[in-house]
Amino acid sequence: MGIYDILKQKWTDPSTKIMPLPKKISAGLIAGAIGAAVGNPADLAMVRMQADGRLPAAQRRNYTSVVDAIARMSRQEGIGSLWRGSAMTVNRAMLVTASQLASYDQFKETILEKGVMGDGLGTHVTASFAAGFVAAVVSNPVDVIKTRVMNMKVDAGKAAPYAGALDCAIKTVRAEGPMALYKGFVPTISRQGPFTVVLFVTLEQVRKLFKDL
Protein backbone atom coordinates (compact mmCIF):
# COMPACT_ATOMS: atom_id res chain seq x y z
CA MET A 1 0.00 0.00 0.00
CA GLY A 2 2.96 2.30 0.62
CA ILE A 3 4.32 1.69 -2.88
CA TYR A 4 0.84 2.22 -4.35
CA ASP A 5 0.56 5.60 -2.60
CA ILE A 6 4.01 6.65 -3.86
CA LEU A 7 3.05 5.78 -7.46
CA LYS A 8 -0.32 7.45 -6.98
CA GLN A 9 1.35 10.71 -5.97
CA LYS A 10 3.68 10.54 -8.98
CA TRP A 11 1.00 9.60 -11.54
CA THR A 12 -1.89 11.79 -10.38
CA ASP A 13 -2.72 14.66 -12.72
CA PRO A 14 -1.72 17.83 -10.81
CA SER A 15 -4.49 19.89 -12.42
CA THR A 16 -7.41 17.51 -11.85
CA LYS A 17 -6.00 15.70 -8.79
CA ILE A 18 -7.24 12.45 -10.38
CA MET A 19 -5.29 9.39 -11.50
CA PRO A 20 -6.90 7.56 -14.48
CA LEU A 21 -8.16 4.02 -13.80
CA PRO A 22 -5.55 2.31 -16.06
CA LYS A 23 -2.77 3.99 -14.04
CA LYS A 24 -4.43 2.94 -10.77
CA ILE A 25 -4.49 -0.67 -11.97
CA SER A 26 -0.86 -0.44 -13.12
CA ALA A 27 0.20 0.99 -9.75
CA GLY A 28 -1.65 -1.83 -7.97
CA LEU A 29 -0.02 -4.49 -10.15
CA ILE A 30 3.46 -3.11 -9.50
CA ALA A 31 2.87 -2.70 -5.75
CA GLY A 32 1.40 -6.19 -5.44
CA ALA A 33 4.30 -7.78 -7.32
CA ILE A 34 6.95 -6.11 -5.17
CA GLY A 35 5.12 -6.86 -1.92
CA ALA A 36 4.61 -10.53 -2.79
CA ALA A 37 8.21 -10.99 -3.95
CA VAL A 38 9.51 -9.57 -0.66
CA GLY A 39 7.04 -11.60 1.41
CA ASN A 40 7.37 -14.95 -0.38
CA PRO A 41 9.93 -16.48 2.05
CA ALA A 42 7.57 -15.89 5.00
CA ASP A 43 4.60 -17.15 2.98
CA LEU A 44 6.48 -20.33 2.06
CA ALA A 45 7.48 -20.84 5.70
CA MET A 46 3.83 -20.44 6.75
CA VAL A 47 2.60 -22.98 4.18
CA ARG A 48 5.24 -25.53 5.25
CA MET A 49 4.55 -25.04 8.97
CA GLN A 50 0.80 -25.47 8.43
CA ALA A 51 1.33 -28.64 6.39
CA ASP A 52 3.90 -30.14 8.77
CA GLY A 53 1.30 -31.63 11.12
CA ARG A 54 -0.28 -33.63 8.29
CA LEU A 55 3.00 -35.32 7.32
CA PRO A 56 4.19 -38.66 8.78
CA ALA A 57 6.36 -38.11 11.85
CA ALA A 58 9.51 -39.16 9.99
CA GLN A 59 8.93 -36.57 7.23
CA ARG A 60 8.11 -33.59 9.44
CA ARG A 61 10.48 -30.65 9.34
CA ASN A 62 9.58 -29.48 12.87
CA TYR A 63 10.35 -25.81 12.34
CA THR A 64 10.23 -23.93 15.63
CA SER A 65 9.36 -20.55 14.09
CA VAL A 66 9.19 -18.65 10.81
CA VAL A 67 12.75 -17.42 11.37
CA ASP A 68 13.93 -21.00 11.98
CA ALA A 69 12.10 -22.19 8.84
CA ILE A 70 13.67 -19.50 6.64
CA ALA A 71 17.16 -20.07 8.12
CA ARG A 72 17.01 -23.85 7.65
CA MET A 73 15.60 -23.60 4.11
CA SER A 74 18.46 -21.24 3.22
CA ARG A 75 21.10 -23.58 4.65
CA GLN A 76 19.67 -26.89 3.46
CA GLU A 77 18.09 -25.96 0.12
CA GLY A 78 19.81 -22.75 -0.90
CA ILE A 79 18.68 -19.12 -0.85
CA GLY A 80 16.75 -19.62 -4.10
CA SER A 81 14.41 -22.07 -2.38
CA LEU A 82 12.87 -19.17 -0.44
CA TRP A 83 11.19 -18.06 -3.67
CA ARG A 84 9.83 -21.48 -4.60
CA GLY A 85 6.25 -21.05 -5.87
CA SER A 86 6.70 -17.30 -6.03
CA ALA A 87 5.17 -17.02 -9.52
CA MET A 88 1.71 -17.98 -8.24
CA THR A 89 2.07 -15.87 -5.12
CA VAL A 90 3.16 -12.81 -7.10
CA ASN A 91 0.43 -13.23 -9.74
CA ARG A 92 -2.25 -13.53 -7.06
CA ALA A 93 -0.93 -10.53 -5.14
CA MET A 94 -0.82 -8.43 -8.31
CA LEU A 95 -4.46 -9.22 -9.09
CA VAL A 96 -5.71 -8.73 -5.53
CA THR A 97 -3.76 -5.52 -4.92
CA ALA A 98 -4.68 -3.98 -8.27
CA SER A 99 -8.37 -4.87 -7.98
CA GLN A 100 -8.62 -3.85 -4.32
CA LEU A 101 -6.71 -0.55 -4.31
CA ALA A 102 -7.69 0.65 -7.78
CA SER A 103 -11.39 -0.14 -7.30
CA TYR A 104 -11.46 1.50 -3.84
CA ASP A 105 -10.06 4.74 -5.22
CA GLN A 106 -12.38 4.56 -8.23
CA PHE A 107 -15.52 3.89 -6.17
CA LYS A 108 -14.59 6.63 -3.70
CA GLU A 109 -13.98 9.17 -6.48
CA THR A 110 -17.28 8.28 -8.17
CA ILE A 111 -19.26 8.66 -4.93
CA LEU A 112 -17.69 12.07 -4.27
CA GLU A 113 -18.09 13.26 -7.87
CA LYS A 114 -21.78 12.29 -7.95
CA GLY A 115 -22.35 13.97 -4.62
CA VAL A 116 -23.92 10.84 -3.14
CA MET A 117 -22.02 11.31 0.14
CA GLY A 118 -19.26 13.47 1.51
CA ASP A 119 -15.70 12.36 2.21
CA GLY A 120 -16.53 10.63 5.47
CA LEU A 121 -17.04 7.26 7.11
CA GLY A 122 -20.08 6.34 4.98
CA THR A 123 -18.15 6.83 1.74
CA HIS A 124 -15.13 4.93 3.05
CA VAL A 125 -17.23 1.95 4.21
CA THR A 126 -19.24 1.80 0.96
CA ALA A 127 -16.20 2.11 -1.32
CA SER A 128 -14.18 -0.39 0.70
CA PHE A 129 -16.92 -3.03 0.76
CA ALA A 130 -17.35 -2.65 -3.02
CA ALA A 131 -13.57 -2.98 -3.41
CA GLY A 132 -13.63 -6.14 -1.27
CA PHE A 133 -16.28 -7.64 -3.53
CA VAL A 134 -14.24 -6.84 -6.65
CA ALA A 135 -11.11 -8.32 -5.08
CA ALA A 136 -13.00 -11.50 -4.13
CA VAL A 137 -14.36 -11.91 -7.68
CA VAL A 138 -10.87 -11.45 -9.16
CA SER A 139 -8.93 -13.56 -6.64
CA ASN A 140 -11.26 -16.55 -6.13
CA PRO A 141 -10.33 -18.35 -9.40
CA VAL A 142 -6.63 -17.85 -8.61
CA ASP A 143 -7.12 -19.25 -5.10
CA VAL A 144 -8.97 -22.32 -6.43
CA ILE A 145 -6.23 -23.04 -8.97
CA LYS A 146 -3.43 -22.34 -6.48
CA THR A 147 -4.98 -24.70 -3.91
CA ARG A 148 -5.47 -27.50 -6.44
CA VAL A 149 -1.91 -27.23 -7.77
CA MET A 150 -0.39 -27.14 -4.27
CA ASN A 151 -2.49 -30.06 -3.05
CA MET A 152 -2.24 -32.31 -6.11
CA LYS A 153 -0.96 -35.80 -5.43
CA VAL A 154 1.88 -36.90 -7.68
CA ASP A 155 2.41 -40.68 -7.79
CA ALA A 156 5.92 -42.00 -8.44
CA GLY A 157 6.50 -42.75 -12.11
CA LYS A 158 3.32 -41.00 -13.22
CA ALA A 159 2.70 -37.58 -14.69
CA ALA A 160 1.36 -34.89 -12.38
CA PRO A 161 -2.40 -34.20 -12.69
CA TYR A 162 -1.62 -30.61 -13.72
CA ALA A 163 1.36 -29.30 -15.68
CA GLY A 164 0.89 -25.86 -14.15
CA ALA A 165 -1.62 -23.18 -13.21
CA LEU A 166 -2.94 -22.64 -16.75
CA ASP A 167 -3.32 -26.38 -17.34
CA CYS A 168 -5.17 -26.69 -14.02
CA ALA A 169 -7.56 -23.86 -14.97
CA ILE A 170 -8.32 -25.37 -18.39
CA LYS A 171 -8.89 -28.89 -17.01
CA THR A 172 -11.06 -27.58 -14.17
CA VAL A 173 -13.30 -25.57 -16.51
CA ARG A 174 -13.58 -28.46 -18.98
CA ALA A 175 -14.43 -31.02 -16.29
CA GLU A 176 -16.60 -28.95 -13.95
CA GLY A 177 -17.62 -25.81 -15.83
CA PRO A 178 -16.56 -22.16 -15.34
CA MET A 179 -18.34 -21.80 -11.98
CA ALA A 180 -15.95 -24.37 -10.49
CA LEU A 181 -13.46 -21.48 -10.30
CA TYR A 182 -15.81 -19.79 -7.82
CA LYS A 183 -16.08 -22.66 -5.36
CA GLY A 184 -15.73 -21.23 -1.87
CA PHE A 185 -16.78 -17.74 -3.00
CA VAL A 186 -19.09 -17.16 -0.01
CA PRO A 187 -16.30 -17.80 2.55
CA THR A 188 -13.97 -15.66 0.43
CA ILE A 189 -16.30 -12.63 0.35
CA SER A 190 -17.16 -13.19 4.03
CA ARG A 191 -13.46 -12.77 4.81
CA GLN A 192 -12.51 -10.25 2.13
CA GLY A 193 -15.44 -7.86 2.74
CA PRO A 194 -14.90 -7.11 6.45
CA PHE A 195 -11.11 -7.20 6.04
CA THR A 196 -11.20 -4.60 3.26
CA VAL A 197 -13.62 -2.36 5.16
CA VAL A 198 -11.43 -2.38 8.30
CA LEU A 199 -8.28 -1.91 6.19
CA PHE A 200 -9.43 1.16 4.25
CA VAL A 201 -11.43 2.81 7.05
CA THR A 202 -8.34 2.53 9.28
CA LEU A 203 -6.11 3.81 6.48
CA GLU A 204 -8.34 6.85 5.93
CA GLN A 205 -8.33 7.67 9.64
CA VAL A 206 -4.53 7.37 9.80
CA ARG A 207 -4.21 9.64 6.75
CA LYS A 208 -6.54 12.16 8.38
CA LEU A 209 -4.55 12.00 11.62
CA PHE A 210 -1.24 12.71 9.87
CA LYS A 211 -2.84 15.43 7.77
CA ASP A 212 -4.10 17.21 10.90
CA LEU A 213 -0.69 17.08 12.62
Image (cartoon, grey):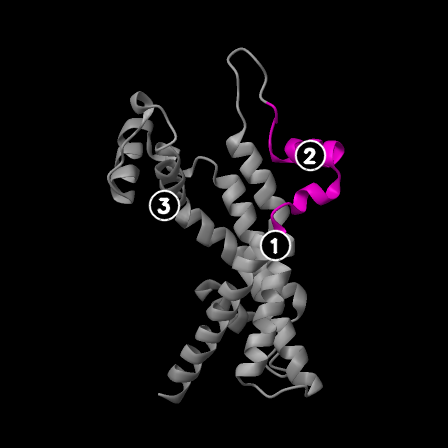
Q: Earlier in the sequence, mark 2 or mark 3?
A: 3
Cα separation, mark 2 vs mark 1, equals: 19 Å
Tell me where residue 49 sits by quadrant: top left
Q: Residue at x 48, y 40 (%)?
A: 86
Dominant secondary structure of the residues highlighted in magenta in the image: helix
Q: x and y percent of residue 44 in the render? A: 40, 40
- Nearer the observer, 135 or 31: 135
Cα separation, mark 2 vs mark 3, equals: 29 Å
Instruction: Find disc 1 in the rendering and name its residue.
Output: 186
Q: x and y percent of residue 203 in the render? A: 45, 73
Q: Residues within 10 Å of mark 3 (few under 14, many from 20)?
A: some
Q: Is residue 208 left or right of residue 146?
A: left
Tell me the amino acid under the disc marked 1. Val
Labelled disc at residue 42 = 3
Q: Is residue 58 left or right of residue 162?
A: left
Tell me the amino acid under the disc marked 3. Ala
| 165 inside magenta stretch | yes
Cα separation, mark 3 vs mark 1, equals: 27 Å
Instruction: Find disc 2 in the rendering and name its residue.
Output: 172
Mark 2 secondary-structure assignment:
helix
Q: Earlier in the sequence, mark 3 or mark 1?
A: 3
